[in-house]
Amino acid sequence: MNKIAVLTSGGDAPGMNAAIRAVVRTGIAKGWEVYGVQQGYEGLMNGHMDQMGQRAVGGIVQQGGTILGSARALEFKTVEGRQKALAELKKREIDGLVVIGGNGSQTGANALYEMGFPVVGIASTIDNDLYGSEMTIGVDTALNIALEAIDRLKITASSHKRAFLLEVMGRDCGYLALMAGIAGGAEYISIPELPNEPEDIAKELHAAYERGKKHSIIVVAEGAKYNANALIQYFKEHKAELGFELRATILGHIQRGGAPTAFDRILATRLGGAATAALAGGEYGVLVGLNKGTITTTPLSVVVANKKSLDLGLIELHDELNN
Ligand code: F6P
């Protein structure tokens, strides 16, 4: 291996820059040339890539986002799109690729590998829904941002005897909502994995009110059966039964910005180093991830064929705590 390229793809995640830095510097330490691809697979198909030196990744370990840019490239889902990307890599004699991203990105990485190109994936998404890594880059930062929002909402909620509903990201996965709800002491957590009805939430909140609670926090995953907007509508119509006034906050992309936590910087740095080590060792078509405290590799074919499960026992624990 002499030349590798690195790209970030899909939704950005805090810590991606630390991963880019680690790939570039550990790649150069191995005597390779390292190319940074602009805007994910979009840039790969269009040949937008430049060689990066050690200094090009200076001062970025603490920055959220991705200095390479990211995109969701529809054309790359086609064979023609992927052939275009391979031709661009071939033109520059690049012989290895590191893909930093989540499910969609690693599906693309696996497709390139199956077309014969040496690829290694790095687990990165705030959703924590990627099989093959217990924690992905960006989750810890996003979780702490959601937690700060809960802590702030609790203060104002208790001053005004209100119920606050906070919607957090996560696509179809309830990880962020579940963990933020537990860490923030929410009264109710609603996740896609355990669909519930607005009546269930209203009942819980009313019971909390009857027990003398001065406020209530409901954390809702964006992918839950009823998202914030649907719940607001329901609670508007059933205002009298609740006991609390209801306000809603949709946290949205705020969760993806900000400086990465120490955990995310260290995870990203370890995974970046592991990705170039895998390429150097001829271990291609794998995802580098964190499992039981150690860095592991999992075949991309296994990663994309499996769904990561959520520890639903934590909901039971939450229910016991919340009385
Ligand atoms: O996958 C990360 C994520 O932030 C999800 O939580 C969310 O559903 C989605 O991306 C939002 O995508 P976009 O930034 O394209 O609106």
Image: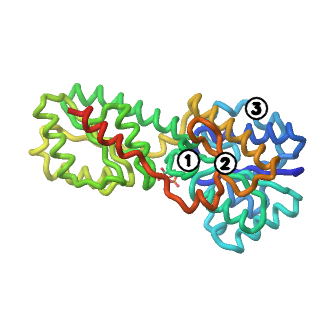
21 vs 288, nearest the viewer: 288
Question: Few, some or many C-alpha atoms within 10 Å of disc 3 (few <14, some 14-19, many ≥20)?
Answer: few
**Residue 163 falls left or right of residue 100:** left
Q: Is residue 18 visible?
A: no
Give the label, 3 or 2, closer to the camera. Answer: 2
236 vs 44, nearest the viewer: 44
CB at disc 3 and ligand 1 closer than 8 Å: no
What residue did someone put label 1 on? 125
What residue did someone put label 3 on? 58
Going by the numbered disc 1, the residue's amino acid type is: Thr
Distance in Å between CA atoms under marks 3 and 2: 28 Å
Give the label, 1 or 3, closer to the camera. Answer: 1
x and y percentages locating residue 261 in the rendered image: 56, 30
x and y percentages locating residue 291 in the rendered image: 58, 41
**Residue 55 falls left or right of residue 293:** right
Residue plotted at (25% across, 51% down): 231
First of labels 3, 2 by sequence position: 3
Distance in Å between CA atoms under marks 1 and 3: 23 Å
Going by the numbered disc 3, the residue's amino acid type is: Gly
Question: Mark number for residue 37?
Answer: none
First of labels 2, 1 by sequence position: 1
132 vs 172, nearest the viewer: 132
Residue plotted at (62% across, 51% down): 101
Residue plotted at (60% across, 41% down): 290
- Proximity of marks 1 and 3: CB atoms separated by less than 8 Å: no
- Proximity of marks 3 and 2: CB atoms separated by less than 8 Å: no
Going by the numbered disc 2, the residue's amino acid type is: Thr
Question: Mark number for residue 297?
Answer: 2
Is 316 placed above or below 265 here? below
Q: Quadrant of residue 204?
A: top left
